[in-house]
Amino acid sequence: MLTGIGLLVPGPADSPPIRDTSLVLEDGLIAAIGEEPAGADRVIDAAGLTVLPGLVDGHVHPTFGEWTPAQNSIGWITNYVHGGTTTMVSAGELHVPGLPFEELTPSLVSALAVTAKETTGRLRPSGMKASVGTVLLVPGMSQARFDELAEAGVDQLKFIFYDWGRLGDGEAQQYVTWAHERGMTVKMHSGGVSRSGSSRVAGHEVVSAVRPDVIAHISGGPIPMPDDEIRALVADLPEAAYEVCSSMNYRATLVAVDALRAAGRLDRLTLGTDTPGGTGVIPRGMMRNVCFLASICGLDPVLAVAAATDNTARAHGLKAGRIAAGYPADLVICGPIQGSMATDALESFALGDLPGISMILIDGEIVVGPRSQQTPPPKTLATMR
């Protein structure tokens, strides 16, 4: 049982917050909302705090376990759990030392993805659910190659080093078709070059021709496409997911959010950190994204939370990011930090204040508590009784 919930935010944009409620968790899943059956094995008192779905980081770059050569840091995944992220999606394991960006072959990118999936993807540090093993699409891949990847359990693909000089030959579009036939999600690097310097520039012409499922860092990673091209994409590809990352161009983020708001497509706004990388290791990166959307972009905090949870999970085909019966009990118990004027986590986001995290549950098990080591403590702490 999870009792004493001051405010529960279900995750989906069309699900309003619920005040003064409780949760029943069973076998790692959410069994019921608002019920308090007798005889629970364990009872957690949320002490009036806010309960959010675990945050879903749609853009990370894992390498080997919890070590990232990009920042020569160890333990980053555990620190992200303490920052409220319970699920992350790889945007490609492209920081492996010595990876020859200009000489990538179908066999190399396939082997890299499968190896990552079968190693780092198995670890789950501090319970983190990581969709690891994302294929970096290159010319020359066959339909049989896609079959092999699907059989290996690979379900995320990304265009980043693809040669857009051959855009007109139809191969990239064929990849998207093959991917969809196998239930795979296709992400695409957009904007200018990334830290590697080897990624290819992709603006409106390229992205609209390929029609990926997720347009990575639409507001820059860190360099975005021109404002008019962002607006044109939102108009031309209303069903695509538009990702904002911590490495954003802040001004271009306002452009992207305003375009989605005007088009009535904020349900297509997703979030990620695009870390580890040149932007660093940011344990509270997803929380900071939510704060930026709510306090600077003027989004209702419920919609900002939806972008960090349900929207991102749906865009990548994951069952996560919702507090609903039958969904994994991945929960963040948080609230205003001591000294904040806010009364709950949603008010914190609207003010631009990061909430303090008390407990985090993944699959119904407490993985962080009684307080996070990556945020100041909230005004009260959840307790087990």
Image: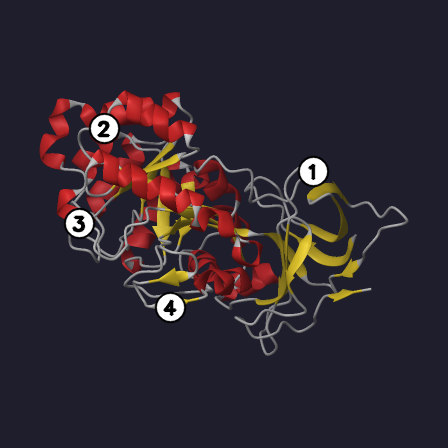
Label 1: how many Cα within 10 Å (few below 14, some 14–19, many 20+): some
Q: Position of residue 363 (x, y in %)?
A: 65, 48
**Distance Cα–Cα, label 2 vs label 3:** 17 Å
Disc ID at residue 73: 4
**Distance Cα–Cα, label 4 vs label 3:** 22 Å
Residue designated by label 3: 100
Residue kind at label 2, given as amino acid type: Met
- The secondary element bearing badge 2 is classed as loop
Disc ID at residue 325: 1
Q: Are marks 4 and 3 in contact (CB under 8 Å)?
A: no
> In which quadrant will I find the C terminus?
bottom right
Q: Position of residue 318 (x, y in %)?
A: 51, 38
Disc ID at residue 379: none
Label 4: how many Cα within 10 Å (few below 14, some 14–19, many 20+): few
Label 2: how many Cα within 10 Å (few below 14, some 14–19, many 20+): some
Mark closest to the chain's N terminus, 2 or 4: 4
Residue kind at label 4, given as amino acid type: Ser
Residue designated by label 2: 141
Residue kind at label 3, given as amino acid type: Pro
Mark closest to the chain's N terminus, 1 or 4: 4
**Distance Cα–Cα, label 1 vs label 4:** 38 Å
Q: Are marks 1 and 4 in contact (CB under 8 Å)?
A: no
